[in-house]
Image: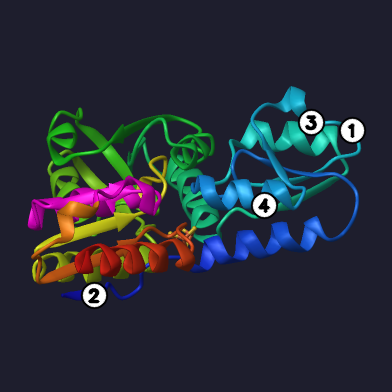
């Protein structure tokens, strides 16, 4: 049996940066919390909590002397202002690509009649992007939804950083038929593009594909959906315990990939488990 790990699997630049910030703060003394989970991987968040940096989910949970780290997905503008008023030490671990999308939303709001965001409306990153718009906005997740948008003179268009580039291009074309002019800002990050492309290419060559990463991770869920379209035997798991051993007997080639917030050791655990169960 051959097990192939997709190129660009696992931690991206923004996630590594955020974890480094938390680890540095954990060793600095004093109480430090993250606003929301620092990344969307429960295993990593639990490990960081054991080192003393726990996630909190509401402003009321913040105490006056806390140091507060802003999660990699960013927070809403008003929330950031309230946190900054409440405590004297705020460390921003928002991924620079998310910051770019927030800035683009503010600029497009200023220049255009309406801003269209490709993304999941309830995702923290999208909520943070919306909070930087100042006028009308729409959130769409599929080309069909873009087809239903009203006509406007000027549209601005951007995406949640982990969306799919092909869908972004399709919606860009649809928007051109919905207005006199559209300003498009490419905010999908390179790490996402590269990982999706490598994973889909691998999925086309294997019997089974395993996608490893948080069930609450948008980029991992997107990877799963893309791989499943190509390889029907695709599984999305967080940890090795979710895999049935019998699945891997008599299989020739298995592909593994992992979301941007999945640590390498979880991928290696899955690889070793599959090798063992193939021998049983
Ligand atoms: Fe940032 Fe892209 Fe990672 S937006 S957190 S580098 S997936």
Image quadrant containing the N terminus: bottom left
**Residue found at x 33% / y 48%:** 237
Q: Are marks 3 and 2 in contact (CB under 8 Å)?
A: no
Q: Earlier in the sequence, mark 4 or mark 1?
A: 4
CA gap between label 3 and label 2 equals 44 Å
Residue at numbered disc 4: 48
Q: Earlier in the sequence, mark 2 or mark 1?
A: 2
Q: Nearer the viewer, residue 145 or 71?
A: 71
Tell me, yes or no, if residue 38 can be seen here: no
Q: Earlier in the sequence, mark 3 or mark 2?
A: 2
Secondary structure of the residue carrying tag 4 is helix
CA gap between label 4 and label 3 equals 18 Å
Question: At which x and y percent is residue 108?
Answer: 43, 46
Q: Is residue 58 left or right of residue 181?
A: right
Question: At which x and y percent is residue 8?
Answer: 35, 73
CA gap between label 4 and label 2 equals 29 Å
Q: Nearer the viewer, mark 4 or mark 3?
A: 4
Residue at numbered disc 3: 62
CA gap between label 4 and label 1 equals 22 Å
Tell me, yes or no, if residue 192 can be seen here: yes
**Residue found at x 85% / y 31%:** 63
Residue at numbered disc 1: 64
**Residue found at x 70% / y 61%:** 21
Q: Which residues are magenta?
A: 220-244
Ligand 1 is within 8 Å of the C-beta of the residue at disc 1: no
Residue at numbered disc 2: 4
Quick one: label 3, few (<14), some, or many (20+) residues within 10 Å?
A: some
Q: Is residue 4 left or right of residue 121?
A: left
Q: Compared to 226, does 14 lie above or below? A: below
């Amino acid at each position: 049996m051959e097990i192939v790990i997709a190129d660009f699997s696992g931690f991206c630049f923004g996630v590594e940066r955020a974890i480094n910030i938390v680890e540095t703060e954990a060793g600095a003394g004093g109480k430090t919390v993250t606003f929301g989970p620092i990344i969307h991987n429960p295993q990593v968040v639990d490990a960081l909590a054991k080192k003393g940096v726990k996630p909190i989910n509401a402003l009321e949970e913040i105490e006056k002397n806390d140091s507060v780290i802003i999660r990699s997905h960013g927070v809403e503008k008003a929330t950031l202002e309230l946190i900054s008023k409440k405590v004297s030490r705020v460390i921003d671990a928002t991924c620079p690509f998310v910051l770019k999308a927030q800035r683009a939303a503010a600029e497009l709001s200023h220049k255009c009649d309406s801003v269209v965001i490709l993304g999941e409306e309830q995702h923290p990153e999208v909520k943070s992007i919306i909070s930087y718009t100042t006028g009308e906005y729409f959130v769409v997740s599929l080309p069909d939804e873009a087809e239903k948008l009203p006509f406007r003179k000027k549209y601005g268009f951007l995406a949640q950083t982990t969306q799919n580039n092909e869908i972004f291009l399709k919606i860009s074309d649809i928007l051109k038929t919905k207005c006199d002019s559209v300003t498009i800002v490419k905010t999908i990050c390179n790490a996402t593009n590269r990982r999706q492309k490598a994973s889909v290419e691998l999925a086309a060559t294997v019997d089974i594909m395993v996608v490893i990463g948080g069930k609450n991770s948008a980029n991992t869920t997107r990877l799963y959906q893309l791989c499943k379209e190509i390889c029907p035997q695709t599984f999305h798991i967080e940890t090795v315990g979710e895999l049935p051993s019998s699945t891997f007997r008599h299989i020739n080639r298995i592909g593994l990939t992992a979301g941007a917030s999945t640590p390498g050791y979880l991928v290696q655990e899955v690889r070793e488990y599959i090798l063992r169960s193939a021998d049983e």
